[in-house]
Image (cartoon, rainbow, N blue to C red):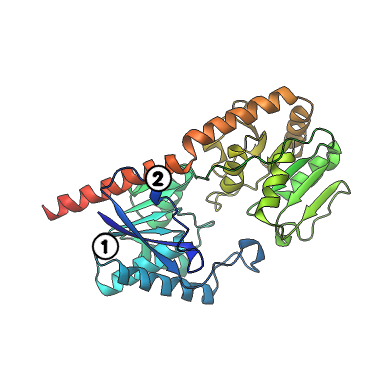
Amino acid sequence: MHWTIAAPFIDKSNIHTAKWLVPYVPGSYHTFDIVPRPQKLANWHHRHSQFTSVSEWLVYWEHGQQTLQAAKSGGVITVFPQLAAMIGTQAKLRGQRIPIVAWLFNVGTCSLGIRRWLAQTSLQDIDYFVVHTRREIEIYHQWLGIAKERFVFVPYQVPAIPITCSEDRTNPFIAVLGSAHRDFATLFTAVEQTKTPTVVVSGKRAIAGLSIPSHVTTLFDIQRHQCLEIAQKAIINVIPLHTHPNITAAGQVTLVEAMRMGRAIIASKCNGIEDYITHGENGWLVEPNSVDALAAAIQELWHNPELRDRLGQSAYDYATKYCSDEAAGQALAQILDQVANNKLHAVL
């Protein structure tokens, strides 16, 4: 079966080199084309709002149009919920029933009112939604009124990351990377209590208005390779998260990247993190919003290099098996096979 792919991170500048998961889908039954985004996707950390702007929606709309025009036969694979909504809406307006698989379907927070109605209307004909935490299945089922069977949990995937740095035990520090739903208030109080040298790499909006301890270094607008170097040099990677029923998922990108690099991780037990970390086996889970729990975990791992090494190796092994491009390609193939079988049975 032929599939047309629309992913916001593939645009005209990288269309000839970006392959996404195509090389990792086994067999030759499924074939693929990629339609590039008309404009380059803006860096998330440079955004002034967590919501998609009108101008951004217009680009998603144009991308959706081009994708449906290219998808003369077969189906469509979208990446990110905005594209799934735009293509779902346009297919409905055209009266075009085309198989659609929505990969990386993470809406961040589930809005109510008109936003919810628009989501329900635009997404009701999507065949399968691929989510990266199990809790999202129930959340989106309730929010969209769509059967749970159309949501599939697949662990978030990250390509292999070269290890260029080793843990810095001469000048040790912990690293905290990321912005979305991060609980920096609890973090700052915990590291102030433990006097732990800390490097925070985040967006300015995420720490605005907070009092930053003197031994915390904050870095903004640095390159990806610099982020990875900091994560590799840190003796612990910490992912402190807020918890709230309206949060669908958070922290998976930072988490899986740290696991792929074999880092010892402390993370809040919420927002789907527990789908990836088994406490004491491949990471360390703490209760969210608890200064005492986070401080105790930092102290526990800070003074136990053998434990850090064991957790880091187990994290690496887990991510290699479940969070690689190869694993995601296998999962995608199974979903596409199911859609193709459903289409065949509908014809018969």
Seen at 75% across and 44% down, the residue is 187
Q: Where is residue 215 in the image (x, y as percent from the top left)?
A: 87, 46
Regarding mark 2 in the picture, which secondary structure is present there? helix
Marked residue nearer the N-terminal end (1 or 2): 2
Residue linked to disc 1: 98
Q: Nearer the viewer, residue 100 or 24?
A: 24
Q: Which mark is residue 320?
A: none
Is residue 203 shown above or below 298? below
Answer whether residue 122 is visible to the viewer in this image. Answer: yes
Outermost residue, top direction? 306
The residues tagged by marks 1 and 2 sit, at their Cα atoms, a distance apart of 24 Å
Residue linked to disc 2: 24
Seen at 71% across and 40% down, the residue is 165
Seen at 65% across and 69% down, the residue is 48
Q: Position of residue 270 (x, y in %)?
A: 59, 41
Label 2 crowd (10 A; few <14 / some 14-19 / many >=20) = some
Label 1 crowd (10 A; few <14 / some 14-19 / many >=20) = many
- Kindly check if marks 1 and 2 are in contact, taking CB atoms under 8 A apart as contact: no
Instruction: Count all numbered tags in the image, as a single digit.
Output: 2
Type of amino acid under label 1: Ile
Type of amino acid under label 2: Tyr
Residue 153, quarter of the rendered image: top left
Outermost residue, front direction? 16
